[in-house]
Image: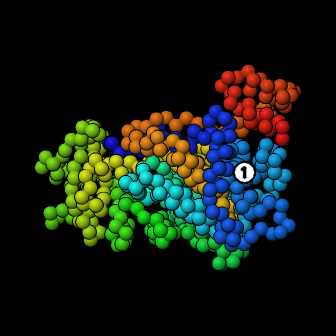
């Protein structure tokens, strides 16, 4: 089938984490932050206390720079080279991310709206198709005492895991993508207990909070349906001034409620998403006075000889205009050789198949975000028991990605074109170093204990006698100096 979820996806920000031990990422982040309108009163609802050594904005900026110094979390800060320049303890960061007064959704929007406005004024953006993208991902956890923790089904591992689901709303113009909003969710399970035992539910962290707290508002989303949350997110984005041509989603989100919602918007937008076919495709569509499933519709149109061949994509396709959710929609059925049929639905009845395929391919840029932020920025790896810290950590990761994505847009895409233009073809292998320095540090600790060798001797052998790891030498010298 021509539309698929490839394991070989394009890299968006990994260029900043190569060769110079993340120095490029560090300089890029600091330069980008200088160009934003930031006010403590607007972002945090209060100003720093007069006796504070570091302001709230400074703490936020330090947290954003953590990945550039291979700092996984505030606990590792004291052992990092960054702590040698800023003499604060890890408690400064813990207090900051655990603060339930901060509205992290507001903070994310404050930055992302400014980022999107910078993109909109570019001449190359004005003729691009703008799409919102919705998808969810797993946040595996290890602690059973984390606030609101439960078990969720992982479609990636095809098993139930301890953790959260996180629903993301992103925006793309085919060149760059940015995260607008997210929600951390659970799955109630058959017994409405989030697949946890009574003992496990009782041991979860709890905290009394003011009902007006932003954390309480976000915690209430935990048990809501993804469909309703997605609709709420899109409404919020529209109120913030976001305008888009298409909403892209996979088959899980394609339902009558979403189609009616998109049709009712006044901003002239359309839906474009996958539909289910086969045993799971029980939805019926109105066609020539009959109610047919997708499979029955394919059989009927194939028998009529209405299947067409796309040489450009190397596939067969069938186009059919049908009735669904009280409105007219267009279905595309796609097949490659021996593969089974797959389907796409759109509310735009004038959209041709090739253009629909090109636009829907943009949705995979959200998969790029998931892979890179988990591998490079540590998204979803926060193990704090406080739900406020989970929200803060995810927001900070989204900010890091958005800033680097904007920098990549202005430094590369203006000359080489949109990187995601090639997503519809198989793409290229994502190649990143992914925390290898942290692994080396752990190995060195073990080796020093076993062989009674000085750390400096091991570091010398690893860094100065290995061409493959020579790019870590700058970081080693910086760490030694601090």
Residue 121 in sight here:
yes
Q: Residue at position x 60%, y 73% from top?
A: 217
Q: Measured from the top left, where is residue 376 in percent x and y? A: 61, 44
Residue 158 in sight here:
no
User: Position of 253 compared to 211: left or right?
Assistant: left
Q: Residue at position x 64%, y 44% from top?
A: 25
Q: Measured from the top left, where is residue 243 in percent x and y? A: 42, 64
Task: Give the mark count.
Answer: 1
Q: Measured from the top left, where is residue 131 in percent x and y? A: 41, 57
Quarter of the image for residue 126 reads bottom left
| Above or below for 201 versus 460 | below
Depth check, front residue: 365 or 130: 130
**Dividing the image into 4 quarters, which one contains the C terminus?**
top right
**Dividing the image into 4 quarters, which one contains the N terminus?**
top left
Judged from this view, the residue extending furthest toward the bottom is 211
User: Mark 1 highlights which residue?
Assistant: 73
Quarter of the image for residue 103 reads bottom right
Q: How is the image coloured?
A: rainbow
Depth check, front residue: 145 or 449: 449
Q: Residue at position x 70%, y 55% from top?
A: 61
Q: Label 1 crowding class (10 Å Cα cut-off): few <14, some 14-19, many 20+?
A: some
Judged from this view, the residue extending furthest toward the top is 465
Could you tell me which secondary element the residue under label 1 belongs to?
A: loop
User: Position of 81 compared to 416: left or right?
Assistant: right
Depth check, front residue: 311 or 206: 311
Q: Measured from the top left, where is residue 144 in percent x and y? A: 68, 58
| Above or below for 302 versus 201 | above
Quarter of the image for residue 472 reads top right
User: Position of 242 compared to 107: left or right?
Assistant: left
Q: Residue at position x 46%, y 53% from top?
A: 122
């Amino acid at each position: 089938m021509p539309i698929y979820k490839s394991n070989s996806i394009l890299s968006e920000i990994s260029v900043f984490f190569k060769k110079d031990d993340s120095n490029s990422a560090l300089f890029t982040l600091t330069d980008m932050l200088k160009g934003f309108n930031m006010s403590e009163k607007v972002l945090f609802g209060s100003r720093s206390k007069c006796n504070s050594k570091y302001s709230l904005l400074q703490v936020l900026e330090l947290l954003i720079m953590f990945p550039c110094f291979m700092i996984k979390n505030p606990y590792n800060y004291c052992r990092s080279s960054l702590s040698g320049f800023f003499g604060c303890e890890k408690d400064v960061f813990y207090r900051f991310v655990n603060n339930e007064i901060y509205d992290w959704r507001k903070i994310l929007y404050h930055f992302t709206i400014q980022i999107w406005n910078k993109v909109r004024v570019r001449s190359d953006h004005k003729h691009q198709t703008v799409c919102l993208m919705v998808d969810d991902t797993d946040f595996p956890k290890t602690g059973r005492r984390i606030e609101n923790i439960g078990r969720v089904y992982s479609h990636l591992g095809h098993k139930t895991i301890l953790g959260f689901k996180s629903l993301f709303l992103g925006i793309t113009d085919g060149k760059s993508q940015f995260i607008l909003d997210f929600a951390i969710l659970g799955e109630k399970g058959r017994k409405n207990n989030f697949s946890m035992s009574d003992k496990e539910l009782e041991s979860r962290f709890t905290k009394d909070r003011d009902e007006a707290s932003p954390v309480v508002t976000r915690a209430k989303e935990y048990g809501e349906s993804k469909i309703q949350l997605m609709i709420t997110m899109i409404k919020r984005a529209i109120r913030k001034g976001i305008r888009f041509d298409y909403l892209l989603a996979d088959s899980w989100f394609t339902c009558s409620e979403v189609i009616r919602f998109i049709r009712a918007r006044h901003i002239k937008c359309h839906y474009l998403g996958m539909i289910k076919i086969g045993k799971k495709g029980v939805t019926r569509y109105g066609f020539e006075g009959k109610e047919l499933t997708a499979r029955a519709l394919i059989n009927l149109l194939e028998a009529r000889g209405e299947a067409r061949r796309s040489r450009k994509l190397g596939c067969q396709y069938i186009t059919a205009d049908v009735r669904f959710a009280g409105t007219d929609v267009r279905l595309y059925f796609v097949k490659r050789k021996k593969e089974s049929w797959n389907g796409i639905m759109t509310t735009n009845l004038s959209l041709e198949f090739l253009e629909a395929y090109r636009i829907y391919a943009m949705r995979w840029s959200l998969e790029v975000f998931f892979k890179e932020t988990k591998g490079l920025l540590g998204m979803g790896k926060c193990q704090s028991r406080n739900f406020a810290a989970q929200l803060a950590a995810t927001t900070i990761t989204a900010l890091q990605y958005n800033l680097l994505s904007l920098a990549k847009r202005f430094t590369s895409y203006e000359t080489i074109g949109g990187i995601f233009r090639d997503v519809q073809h198989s793409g290229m292998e994502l190649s990143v170093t992914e925390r290898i320095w942290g692994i080396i540090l752990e190995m060195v600790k073990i080796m020093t204990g076993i062989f009674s060798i000085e750390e400096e001797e091991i570091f010398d052998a690893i860094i100065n006698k290995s061409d493959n790891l020579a790019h870590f030498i700058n970081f080693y010298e910086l760490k030694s100096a601090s």
